[in-house]
Amino acid sequence: MSAVPSNETGRKTMLKRVAMVLSVLAVLLVSAFLVNKVTAVTLDDVAYHFSLGRTKATVGVSGGDIYAISPDGLAETKLCSLKLQEDFVTRVKVEARFTNAIGDTLPFLVNWVSLGSEDSLGTTEGFKAGNLHFSGEFTELQPDAPMGAPADCERKMAEFMNRRHRICMVRSSLIPTENGVFSAYRFDQLQMWLPESIFEMNGLVKSDAAHEVQTQSCPLSSAVPWDVAFRKSLRVINMENLPDEDAEEKGTDKEV
């Protein structure tokens, strides 16, 4: 039986070494990814604290805003805002520090997996070793708030509903102070009810599509990112209320 050539043996040995190195690199990358997710704290963690879904690139959403939700649920068009008395809207100034217990205890892990990057989305101090300083406003429409809408808004709602859009009202929202183009919010489960008289007043006929879509519910909130839900299950995200300098001067500091 002939012996295996030495050059072929060396090639096999080299391939084994390369495969081993690649395996080690893969394990390190996966480990770094998991550590990054476990030790992080993001704006979505803040939103989830207020029972809201993921943040979206939507300018200043507030309780009482009315949206048309497309049939596939992918597009949300703001139609108008209810003209509400402030008595029917709860506004709470949020000034707090959110910390990740693991990341705060082991900051070198965060620094290692983040490679020195900072996430300043909606914060004043940014993301530093499992800490996020959040400043913003939480608004919520009270249950007994009147549901009247401006006439022009009623026309828009009727037109969109005839195109099979759901008409939904924002019940609560969270708006960062320093990054107002991002918001997290939650809709009422029930749609805005539009009787046939509203369609007739605007020269429209309530279509079969509108009758059908009227029975559908609104999306309560966007889906929660898996890593946010994972950190929530581990109970590693803590919130500490910080003094609000403006509120202290006015003597109206609120806690959330």
Image: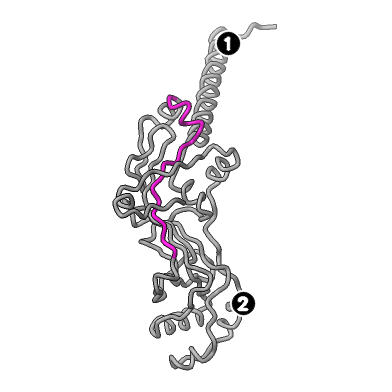
Using the rendered view, name the quadrant where residue 4 is placed: top right
- Amino acid type, label 2: Thr
Residue 9 badge: 1
For the magenta stretch, what is the residue range? 90-108
Q: Which mark is residue 166?
A: none
Above or below residue 229? Residue 205 is below
Please, what is the three-letter code of the amino acid marked with disc 1?
Thr
The residue located at (51%, 31%) in the rendering is 102
Across and down, in percent, residue 9 comes to 58, 10
Picture layout, residue 95 above or below residue 28 = below
Question: Is residue 91 shown in magenta?
Answer: yes
Which residue is most to the right? 1
- Badges 2 and 1: C-beta atoms under 8 Å apart? no
Q: Is residue 60 left or right of residue 147?
A: left
Circle 2 sits in a helix, a strand or a loop, which is it?
Answer: loop
Expressed as whole percent of the image width and height from the top left, the position of residue 160 reads: 47, 79
Question: Looking at the image, is 31 positioned above or below residue 234?
Answer: above
Q: In the depicted view, which residue is nearer to us: 18 or 46?
A: 46
Whether the magenta-drawn stretch holds residue 86 is answered as no
Q: Residue at x 47, y 63 (%)?
A: 140
- The foreground one among 91 and 73 is 91
Which of pointers 2 and 1 indicates the residue nearer the eye? 2
* Residue that lies at the very extreme toward the front in this rendered image: 251
SS of the residue under disc 1: helix
Q: Can you give x and y, in whole percent of width and height, for residue 217 in the image?
A: 59, 70
x 41%, y 74%: residue: 84
Residue at 64% x, 6% y is: 3
Residue indicated by mark 2 = 215
Dot 1, crowdedness within 10 Å: few (<14), some or many (≥20)? few
Q: Earlier in the sequence, mark 2 or mark 1?
A: 1
Considering the image in quadrants, where does the N terminus appear?
Answer: top right
Q: Position of residue 101 (x, y in %)?
A: 50, 33
